[in-house]
Structure formats: C-alpha cells, structure tokens
Amino acid sequence: MKKAGPDKSIGGYQDLELPFFQANLDQASVKTNSARSAIKLTLDSVSAKKLWLPAYVCDAVVEAANDLCIDLEYYQISSTFDVDGDLRLGKQEFILAIDYFGLTGDSVDRCLKKFGQGNTIVDCSQAYFSNHAGALATVWSPRKFFGLPDGGLLYSDDPRIRQPEHNDVTSADRMGHLISRLTNSPEIAYQQYQKAEQEIAALPVSGLSSLTERLLHSVDSEAARAARNRNARYLHERLSEHNQLHLHVGDEKAPLCYPLLPKTKTASRSDLITKRVYLPTYWPEVLTRVEESSFEWNLVTNGLFLPCDQRYTEEDMDRVISLLAIQ
C-alpha cells in the first residue's frame, strides 16, 4: 500500500492487486539489478587484481571479472564441493566460493575458514534462503527462486562496497515471459525468456528497480521456503540411495533444486523434456575448463537437477520420480 502524503494520487485507473510481504531484504546492504552486477560491484570496489573461481561456475561470473580486466584462475572442487586443498592466495587476490543448489553451505564455511573472510566472495545465487556468510561479500539472485525480471542482493560490511547511485529503470521491458506464463504454457514464451536473459547480461551495474523490489515484496517467501523444503526432503528420501552426491537436505536449506547424479541408468534430460519436465543444465561451458571424467565433467554431463520449488506438490514429485525410470 502506498503511503499517504500531500502528493499521493487519489482516483484514476486501477493498478495490479499484489499482496505485500516482508521480503528477505533486511540482510542486503546493497540492492542491484543482477547478481552479476553485485559481483562486479564488489570486485571493482576492492580493486581486485586476481580472482580464483571454481571451474564449475557459470559464464556470467567469468564475464563479470573479464569486464573489469581482472586476472582469472580456476580451481577444482572435490566431490564434497570443497576447494582444491593446494590452493594459496597471493596479495590482492580473492576467491569466490559457491553455495551450490543451496545445499553446500558447509563447504563454503570451510573455504571461509581457510582463506579468510576478507578474501572470500560467497555466491549464493542458488541459495536465496541462506544467511550472509560473514565474507567480504555475499551475493543472492532472487530471480532464480521467484518470477522476477531481474535483481541481485549483496551483503557486505566493507565501506568500499556501496549502493549504486542510479537504479535500473528497464525492468518492465523484461516482463513479457512472466506475464505470458500466467495464462500460457512455458513453451510459448521461452524465446522471450532467453531474450530477457541476454538483456540482463548486458546491463550496466545499477541499483534494484522499484518494480522488481515491489514484485519481490509480493512473494510469500516463508511459504516458498516451506514448500521447497518439503519437496526437496520428499525427493531425497526416495532418491538418496540412487545418488552419488552425499547431501544433507535439512529443514533450513530450501534449495534451488534437488541435484541427482545417478548411480545407475535413468531417463535422460532429453527424455524428461519430451514429457514436459524441464531441467536446467549447470553449466555446459564448464566442459571447456575441466578434464573428461573429472567431478565437474560428471556433474555437467550426467547431473539431473530436479525442480522442487514452491509451484509443486508431492504429487508432482512422484511424477518426476516415476519418469526417471531408475533401473
């Protein structure tokens, strides 16, 4: 509800009737137009000279560093998602650690303990419901969890990392696929979605738009958290014995998805798509940075990242399990 005041409009045409919830914004000291922008803002603010990235990372993070002409090195992760034990940081070097799927917070904590909070950026793009890690910067991407046109959140107590001067004003241009999905199947607006993703990649660093912030306040995040936890536990109880990944799926995680690295033959991602079960790929570009048969190669090539979000019920999870046709 808009606050009363001498300039508040009264009358005229109706606007959208959106609920208003307390969004998970309190722990964000900086609000940006994307997680990529938040990472770029952090690196630029601290004058980073070199950044260590996991080889298992999306190109958006790579491009953020490249845009600033920062030297990059890649490190390997273990099957527990831990940083290469031989890695050492030099002066003015930083490391980025990822809370993969919202389920690898323990490995992030071990990274922070080893490399220090002041040298570590924590990417929680896949872990919206995680708390800030006490690192140099913690970054979240709410649009990976909710229907938003853009947006990124950042927490840091470093005074050099400050809110961008100008907010993004282009969010309305990226609403087409979201509006379409209200009444149509996802296939109809998929090209619009891809176009929106390309536009986000090209955005300059800006603050969070007023539209995206208002939309984020319309989300019942606690209900979403509960639904994700329920669905993730349901999948884990039925699939953990078939999973090469040793995961702890607790009540507090509310993960992005349920990652399944099958021990035995299952339906493929392509098979599931023919049944209109759409799984993401994390991330094909990684194959250019790793050796065949490495843990990262196995995740990209054979990993199945099962939806478990707030749109779905246990009945939907049963359908996914059935379609996997585990042998």
Image (spheres, grey):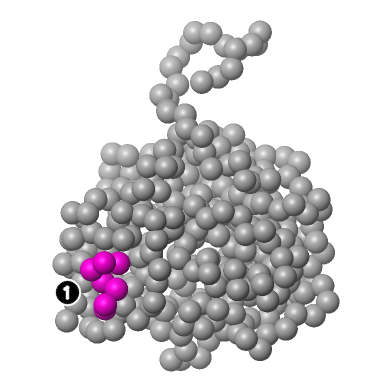
Which residue is depicted at the point 66% across and 51% down? 155
- Quick check: 251 left or right of 4? left
How far across and down, in percent of the image, does residue 220 sit? 41, 38
- Quick check: 283 left or right of 245? right
How far across and down, in percent of the image, does residue 52 sit? 68, 76
Which residue is depicted at the point 55% across and 19% down? 2
Quarter in which the C terminus is drawn: bottom left
Residue labelled with disc 1: 325
From where the camera sits, is residue 123 visible?
A: yes
Residue range (magenta): 236-242
How far across and down, in percent of the image, does residue 209 sit? 60, 38
Q: Amino acid at mark 1?
A: Ala
Question: The residue tagged with tag 1: helix, strand or loop?
Answer: loop
Near-viewer residue (299 or 227): 227
Name the magenta segment's main secondary structure: helix
Looking at the picture, does residue 59 appear above or below residue 301?
A: above
Q: How many marks?
A: 1
- Quick check: 305 left or right of 135? left
Which residue is depicted at the point 63% across and 46% down? 28
Give the image quarter of residue 176. top left
Label 1: how many residues lie within 10 Å, few (<14), some (14-19) or many (20+)? Answer: few
Looking at the picture, does residue 94 appear above or below residue 129?
A: below
